[in-house]
Amino acid sequence: MKAWLLEKQAPVEQRPLRLAEIPTPHAGPGQIRIKVMACGVCRTDAHIAEGDLPLHKSPLVLGHEIVGVVDEVGEGVDRFKLGDRAGVTWLNWACGECKFCKMGKENLCPHARFTGWDADGGYAEYTIVDANFALHLPDRRPFEELAPWMCPGVAGYRAFRLTELKAGDRLGLYGFGPTAAYVLQIAHAKGLEVFVVTRSEKNKQAARELGAEWVGGYDDEMPVKLDGGIIFPPVGELVKFALGQMDSNGRLVLGPVTMSPIVIDDFNLIWHERSIISLANVTRRDGEEFVKIADEVNIKLNIEVFPFSQVPEALIAVRHSRIKGNAVIRVAE
């Protein structure tokens, strides 16, 4: 099969991935093989390619927003059959035995493996995954549309879940990229009001078009107290800013995988049981629930599709924020 291989980390402008012909994998016991139809391109892929995250295996096939069709079923698999649509997220496997897995928090499993980092991902014609960690996908949607559901969609849904908000509550979104666009639509489907804070005029307009109750910049006065919030940019100073807009018992979720220094120099910001929690990976429950609600509410998104031959160009575009919405590789027709 054809696959884009990362063997040595380097800036994406140096095109560290090379297209190669490698043996087509086969499904072992408990596994399925997916003929990859499309794979989303995530900024995390660029971080791995460039060395911001350590290389866990080499050569490596990047890509953790995988959607396709099951074309081989391993012994003992009953969750999928040949021809089923299937998706793969960042969480590729968890042990099921540690205290976190038993708590329903397999995203924190110390033995977890991640797609496109510990296990080969979707920048290839085929991929293998444990059948218990694949998602069933709806039949009526194009694969290119489904691919981003596997990362910004699922991660956004987990961030929303972590706020613990309910219908009638007010949610603040700080920064408004593709993941926040998913969250806004989920929150509306759940009966919440959404308030968006962003610098970008383009993103302000996008939030308005999706029906945000209020959209403003960081210098604008928030008209109400918020019950919870999610920060998307890796900017630590936003934590203090957002906490200042929280009502008592407000919970602030930190979405990035890393942030600049966080300074909270006023105890009143966390007084009255305001709290902060980080987002770390996703669970299968997140994926299953998100796919169901996204399909039900006909979630909207912008995608830019690249052919399989242009994976390096897609990585560069994502790395430098040149994509309006979500970048997707069309692997097969």
Image (cartoon, grey):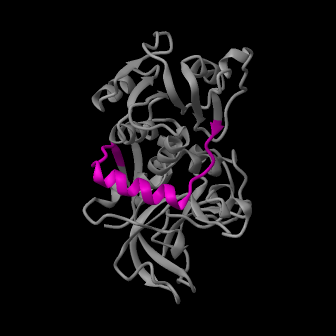
Count of numbered tags = 0
Q: Residue at x 67, y 22 (%)?
A: 270
313 and 160: which one is in front? Answer: 160
71 and 58: which one is in front? Answer: 71
- Residue 254, visible in the rendered structure: yes
Return the x and y of residue 10 as percentages of the image width and height: 66, 48
Residue 265 lies, with reference to residue 322, above or below; the image says above
21 and 223: which one is in front? Answer: 223
Q: Residue at x 53, y 42 (%)?
A: 159
Return the x and y of residue 117 as percentages of the image width and height: 64, 59
Q: Residue at x 29, y 48 (%)?
A: 297
Residue 330 lies, with reference to residue 204, above or below; the image says below
Quadrant where the C terminus sits is bottom left
The span picked out in magenta is 277-304
Whether residue 278 is in magenta: the answer is yes
Q: Quadrant of residue 114?
A: bottom right
Return the x and y of residue 71 as percentages of the image width and height: 40, 81
Whether residue 111 is in magenta: the answer is no
Return the x and y of residue 316 as percentages of the image width and height: 51, 43
Left or right for 102, reference 137: right
Q: Residue at x 67, y 32 (%)?
A: 259
- Residue that lies at the very extreme toward the left in this rendered image: 140
- Residue 24, visible in the rendered structure: no
Residue 67 lies, with reference to residue 43, above or below; the image says below
Left or right for 36, reference 22: left
- Residue that lies at the very extreme toward the bottom in this rendered image: 75
Left or right for 111, reference 134: right
320 and 94: which one is in front? Answer: 94
Left or right for 257, reference 78: right
